[in-house]
Image (cartoon, coloured by chain):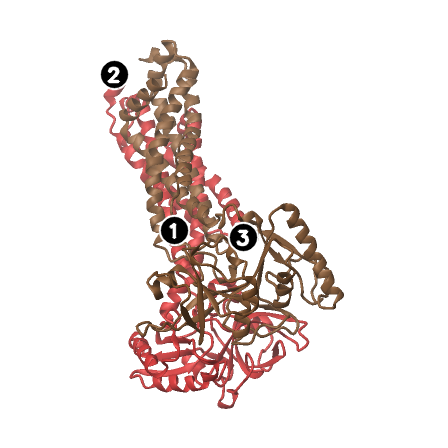
Chain colours: A brown, B red
Amino acid sequence: MFGYYLDLALRSLRRNKMLTALMVLAIALGIGASMTTLTVLHVLSGDPLPGRSGSLYYAQIDPQDIKGMDSSKEPPEQVTLIDGLNLLHAGRADHQALMTGGSVPVQPEQSSLDPFYVEARYTSADFFGMFDAPFLYGQGWTAAEGEAKVREVVIAKSLNDKLFDGANSVGRTLRMAGTSFRIVGVLDSWQPNPHFYDLNSGSYAYGEEVFLPLQTMLELRLDRGGSTDCWGNGGGGVGNILPSNDCVWLQFWAQLDSPAKAAAYQEFLVHYSLDQKALGRFQRVPNVRLRNVMQWLDYNKVVPSDVRLQNGLAFGFLLVCLVNTVGLMLAKFMRRAAELGVRRALGASRRALFAQLLIESGVVGLVGGVGGLLLAMFGLWLVRQRPSDYAALAHLDLSMLFVTFVLAVLATLLAGLLPAWRACQIAPALQLKSN
Amino acid sequence: MQIQPILAALRRHRLATLLIAMEIALACAVLCNACFMIANRIAMMHIDSGVDETSLATVQLTGYEDSHAVDLNARVLAGLRSIPGMQSVTVLNSIPFGARRGTAGITLDAAAQHFGGVVEFYVGGPGSLQALGVHVIAGRGPQADDFRAFTGLMPSDASVQITHSLAEHLWPGVDPLGKDFWLDKMHYRVVGVIDHLVRPDPPGWPDNSKDWSIFVPAQPGKLLAGSYLLRADPRDVPRVLRDARAMIAKVAPDAVFDQEGSQTLSDLRATCFRQDRAMAGILVGVIVALLLVTALGIVGLASFWVQQRRRQIGIRRAIGATRGDILRYFQTENFLIVSFGIALGMVLAFALNVMLMKFYELPRLPLYYLPIGALVLWALGQIAVLGPALRAAAVPPVVATRSV
């Protein structure tokens, strides 16, 4: 039966090419526009570390002075150096990392290359394991080496390609900011999007090229970037002056492998705040937050509001296209009143007619989906030409390809419901008589 | 033209009529709001910076040792000033549409009880305010002895110029000259008011605070170095900037020339607003596509109606209606449906605007967008229906006598 209806549908669609083309065009435009923006939204709100992000938590505590205290307010978005080191050394999580970002000048040995700046991440040792950073050669430094302020560095593949033509550079020397560092590891291409572990330095398509032990950075006073928030008498953070202990400027991440451990760690943060208050360092009542990666991204609203707006617009547009299709489909089905009347008179049930008409709309949806897919690819190409930092990420993946067709066919079937129902209400006798 | 029979006919096609009206209503809502957003973005892109952008460029240097900063300043200033066509080279920490180095919150009392707002401190060496080309509208500009050496983050005590809009915000309706304000323990006194001086990053700030800037005179030194403002004749600016790059390689090989940051101010401005330009482009695309789809929908449905009514049209023609009568019938019918849609669309437009205001900090939709949107849709409807209506008018009266 399905094959027969399909045949009927194709015949009918061919009979009135103009109306069919209009419907397909409307669906294709609507689907193309909404899939373009939906893909961008999908890419931008994606999980940077699938499978792991649920067990990685960002810790926030409130070391600020009593002025303006409001426990309903969020604690600062970063931690102070002293709190960060305390939490790190407490070691109460399965793994933990304290980090901040900056940039350092690289002074290549080759005279053919001018000195240049690279983005740097200063972090404690667990960083690579926690965030699943893949090593091409070598490995990271150990926690003990990090504490010993070793002059060791892990570099990204891009820098390795630039300086060493992609050869295994482990053991070689890299001069940065006037100091020689021994390369201990080379990362394979790795760039989580969004750049979740430090959103201050740009959310998308941003990656560091060198990774240095935090303690080494503190000793050498390397340049740091990102945000510094101070209160009271806090200051510093300019040139080689480190921010004081009344400033937050580091990120603390903890890996907690079960919800029970996460709950226990939250308790630990409260106790830590109470201890610090007893010591006189903290003045406020404990105000802590522990968010996993996706919650942290949500809280920071990393997806640009322009992207959400565009997505809303595109779906508004799709709605207009669908209303348009409903109108056209109504016209198409009503025009066939006589034919449908004959079929009814010959014994076809209403349900059979309804099924036949819906198949016809399904075919329109499928063809519109193909058109929409082509338009979405073109749309994404346009997005990639745009100057946003996320532009290069806009690619259609398999799941979105699937969504395109499902959305197109579902939307068109929905649009076909009303016209098909109306067409089935036709009294066959009336149609037969008038001819 | 009698409307009664048209309405009677429409009542027999309630569903189709409602569909077209719905489409018009949705189009009206999106059209009004999208146009409004475009206007907003364009207004933002045309913000008055208050400076002579076409005559200005900047050179940004990094990577030098702090202890060499004074020496670097001397070498760079002397080197850049020797470039032919250069009118002035001055040191300025932040650059309009470019580097941002002086964003801070100020207070109106020494005890830090009355918060004034987050403003931009433009800390500049001698001649930099004149080089920017801003207009001092009250009080005085900086004098030679205002430019003092400093050791901290910023001069700890200075006579400053602030923008008119900042003055109005801090001391509404009061003469700002001679007023004091503080940044932590650092104290500043207002001695002059300038009409406009935009922040380095205007897109990120609400409309009324895009212009909250302060000029602090200071002697270049350890913490005021590496950021230079170049002024030349507008025709010479690109060449002067190219020469400056070569000159830096010669006089300051120890510094890293920041390619992205060192540009003409016109280029920096274009970069600053490229997101907004792209968004305005997308909105225009949406509007065009929307109008196109709406028009095609009207064409499709009107064609269907014409075909369905061929016999009736033939009968009307046979009993004396002219071609013009038939044409006008379809045009009036379209006008009525579109009007109905517009009425619905205005309500929708306002609802959409309220929603956008809630989520995207958009201002309220001005009322005059509604009649303009209505006119556009009426015109669109008339253009779209013209083809089918002409075809209807061409139906010969003889159709009435045929059985099919």
Which sits earlier in the primary sequence, circle 1 or circle 2? Answer: 1
Q: Position of residue B305 (x, y in %)?
A: 34, 27
Q: Nearer the viewer, residue B130 or B68?
A: B68
Q: Chain of mark 3?
A: A
Real-space CA distance between mark 3 and mark 2, rounded to the nearest whole angstrom: 71 Å
Circles 3, 2 touching at the beta carbon (< 8 Å): no
User: Which residue is depicted at the point 43% across and 31% down?
Assistant: A410
Q: Mark 1 is on which residue type?
A: Ile
Please tell me the numbered disc located at residue B402.
2
Name the residue that disc number 3 marks. Answer: A297
For the C terminus of chain B, the image quarter is top left
Q: Position of residue A11 (x, y in %)?
A: 28, 22
Q: Give the secondary structure at mark 3.
A: helix
User: Which residue is depicted at the point 47% across and 77% down?
Assistant: B93
Circles 1, 2 touching at the beta carbon (< 8 Å): no
Please tell me the numbered disc located at residue A300.
none
For the N terminus of chain B, the image quarter is top left
Q: Position of residue A399 (x, y in %)?
A: 42, 39
Quarter of the figure with residue A235: bottom right
Name the residue that disc number 1 marks. Answer: B282
Q: Is residue B338 above or below residue B283?
A: above
Q: Nearer the viewer, residue B283 or A234?
A: A234
User: Which residue is depicted at the point 65% across and 74% down?
Assistant: A233
Q: Is residue A398 above or below residue B236?
A: above
Q: Chain of mark 1?
A: B
Q: Mark 2 is on which residue type?
A: Arg
Q: Give the secondary structure at mark 1.
A: helix
Same chain? Circles 3 and 1: no
Q: Mark 3 is on which residue type?
A: Leu
Residue B4: in sight, yes or no? Answer: no
Same chain? Circles 3 and 2: no
Task: Answer few, some or many: residues within 10 Å of disc 1's Cα (few below 14, many 20 plus, some between 14 and 19).
Answer: some
